Image: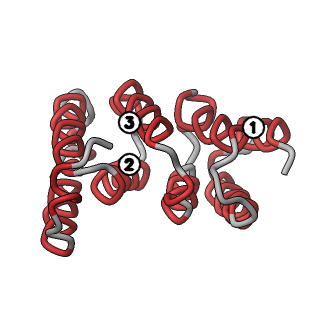
C-alpha cells in the first residue's frame, strides 16, 4: 500500500462515497498487516494519522481501520497501544460518527487491560458530554463490552495488567 496515496484518497473523497472507499482501503490495510509479526511503524503511523486529523476522521467509514487493527492486535506493542489510547483521548470529542465512537470504545474494551480501559472510558465519557445528544451514551456500550470481556477472561493477568 502507498500510504500517502491512502491519505490523499480519504481526504479528497466525497462524504457520501467515503464509507465504501474506507471499507475497501481498510480491507487492504488488514490484508497487508497479515504479512507481519510485529505491527510495522509505517502502518501504525497511517493508523494514527487517520484518527488524529479531522481531514480523515470526519469521513464516514474510518472506523473500518479500527476494526482492521483490532484484528491485528497481537502485533501491537504496549507502547503502540498506549499511543492509540492517547490519540483516542485527544480526539474523541471531535469524533461525530457514532460508528467511529463505538469502534473506539470497543477497541479499548477488548484490547486494553481492564484497569486502564476503565480509566480511558471514564475520560472518554467526560469528552462525550461535549458532543451532540444523539451521539451520547456510546461510551456506556464500551463499559458493557468491557464487563463482558472481564467475565470471559477472569484470569489474574487480564485483570491486573498494565497495557
Q: Earlier in the sequence, mark 3 or mark 2?
A: 3
Taking 137 as reference, is 144 above or below it? below
Residue 134 position within the rendered picture, expressed as x and y whole percent measured from the top left? 24, 46
**Tag 3 residue:** 85
Quick one: which residue is furthest to the bottom in this view?
Answer: 152
Lower sequence index among marks 1 and 3: 1
- Say which quarter of the image contains residue 99: bottom left
Task: Find numbered disc 3 in the image and state the secondary structure of the residue it sits on.
Answer: helix
Q: Is residue 100 above or below residue 23?
A: above
For mark 1, give the secondary structure: helix
Residue at which label 2 appears = 104
Q: Kindly check if marks 2 and 1 are in contact, taking CB atoms under 8 A apart as contact.
A: no
Query: Closer to the camera, 80 or 37?
Result: 37
Quick one: quadrant of the C terminus?
top left
Residue ID for mark 1:
7
Distance, label 1 to label 3, CA atoms, is: 21 Å
Determine the residue positioned at 69% across, 38% down: 41
Question: Which callout, 3 or 2, points to the residue nearer the camera?
Answer: 3
Q: Position of residue 123 (x, y in %)?
A: 20, 31
Where is residue 40? Give x, y as percent. 69, 45
Tally the numbered discs: 3
* Residue 144 lies in quadrant: bottom left
Q: Residue at x 80, y 36 (%)?
A: 8
Amino acid at each position: 500500500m502507498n500510504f500517502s496515496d491512502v491519505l490523499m484518497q480519504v481526504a479528497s473523497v466525497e462524504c457520501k462515497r467515503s464509507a465504501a472507499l474506507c471499507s475497501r482501503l481498510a480491507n487492504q490495510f488488514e490484508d497487508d498487516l497479515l504479512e507481519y509479526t510485529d505491527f510495522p511503524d509505517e502502518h501504525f503511523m497511517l493508523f494514527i494519522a487517520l484518527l488524529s486529523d479531522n481531514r480523515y476522521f470526519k469521513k464516514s467509514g474510518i472506523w473500518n481501520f479500527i476494526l482492521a487493527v483490532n484484528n491485528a492486535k497481537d502485533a501491537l506493542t504496549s507502547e503502540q497501544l498506549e499511543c492509540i489510547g492517547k490519540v483516542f483521548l485527544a480526539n474523541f470529542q471531535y469524533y461525530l460518527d457514532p460508528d467511529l465512537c463505538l469502534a473506539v470504545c470497543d477497541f479499548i474494551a477488548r484490547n486494553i487491560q481492564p484497569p486502564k480501559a476503565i480509566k480511558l472510558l471514564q475520560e472518554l465519557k467526560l469528552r462525550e458530554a461535549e458532543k451532540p445528544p444523539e451521539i451520547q451514551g456510546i461510551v456506556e456500550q464500551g463499559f458493557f463490552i468491557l464487563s463482558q470481556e472481564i467475565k470471559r477472561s477472569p484470569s489474574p493477568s487480564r485483570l491486573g495488567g498494565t497495557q
